[in-house]
Amino acid sequence: MSLLKKITIYFFISIFLIIGIYKLTPNNIQRTISAKILKHISPKLILVARIIFFDRYDIRNFKNDYNVSFLPNTQFTKLDFKERFFDFDIKESINYLSYQKNFFIEIIDDDVWIIDSTGSIRKANFIDIKTNITKKIKTSNIKTNLKNKIVVIGTYVHDKKIYFSFLEYKDSCETLNIIFAKINSGILNFQNYYNSTECGKSIGGGRMQSFEHDNMTGLLVTVAAVVPDKPSERAQDDNSIFGKILFIDSKSKKVINFQRDIELLKVYMQKKI
C-alpha cells in the first residue's frame, strides 16, 4: 500500500473518530466546543458553508435574521446609533451560548446593568453612557452569591427584583430554571423561583413577564427545546413544559400551561385593549 493511500485512510478514520466522540459528548460540552471552533472561523467562511450545506439558507438573512430592513433602518423609523466603549475587556467574558459574545441589558434607576451568560453583572451610569463620547465608560462589578456555573438565557426586572432564567446541566440532563434577587446596593442574594425536572436539548426561550391570572401573581415564561430536523410532540403534550408559555405563581409556584388555552389568551388581550 502506497504512503498516500495510508495517509488518506488514517485521515478519514481520524475524522470519523472525532465526529463520533463529539456526538457522544454532553450537549453543553458540544456547545462549548462549537463556540471555540466558530470563534476562529471567518464569518464569510461560515456564510459560504451555510450556502453549500443548507440549500434553503437565504444569504439576505445573514446576521439579520428575517428582517427586511437593515439596522439602523427599521420598519417605522431610522435609529440614531452611537458607539460607546466600556472599561472591561469583552474577550474576558465567558459565553456558553454561541461563539458570539451575548449580553443582557437592564436599566435600573440611573444605571445600566450588563449581564453575560454566566450571570456576571457589571453596571454603568446611564448619564455617562449618554454623554461620554471620548473616554471608556467606567463600570463596576456587582457581587452575587452565585457559585455554581449557570447559563443565563433571559433576564427580567420587576418590582425591585431581578430574575434570571438559566440552563443547568446535571448528568447529561439540561433543565430550565429561574432565580431571583432583591435589588440592593450590596451583594445580590439569589434564591430559587422555579426548577424544572424535565430534561431537554437545545433549550431556548426564557423570556419572562409579570402577570396576574385567576387572582394569582406570577411570571409568564417562554420555554422551547428545538433540535433542528428532529420535530417532537412535546408542545402538544400537557405533561411537558416545552413549546409553551408557562404561568408560574409566585407564592405556590404552581405551573400552568398558559398558552394551551388560546381562547383564554384572546380574552386577556381583549380585556387589555
Image (tube, grey):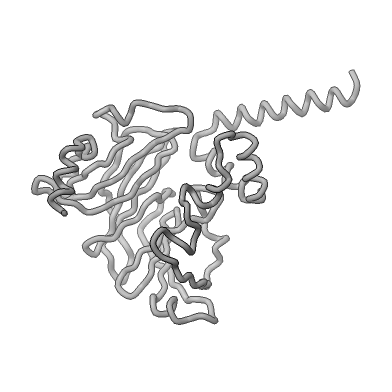
At x 78% / y 26%, what residue is drawn?
Answer: 10
Above or below, 272 against 134 in this view is above
**Residue 150: percent from the left, percent from the top?**
42, 49
144 with respect to 257 (left or right): right
Above or below, 19 against 70 in this view is above
Residue 225 versus residue 77: which sits nearer the camera? 77
For the image shown, how many numbered marks are present on the structure? 0
131 with respect to 180 (left or right): right
**Residue 28: percent from the left, percent from the top?**
49, 40
Q: Which quadrant is the N terminus positioned in?
A: top right
At x 53% / y 72%, what residue is drawn?
Answer: 85
Residue 50 versus residue 239: which sits nearer the camera? 50
Quadrant location of residue 4? top right
**Residue 36: percent from the left, percent from the top?**
60, 47
Residue 40 visible in the displayed image: no
70 with respect to 247 (left or right): right
**Residue 196: percent from the left, percent from the top?**
30, 38
Q: Residue reaching furthest left?
A: 215
Residue 16 versus residue 67: which sits nearer the camera? 67
Above or below, 32 against 102 in this view is above
At x 12% / y 51%, what residue is drawn?
Answer: 271
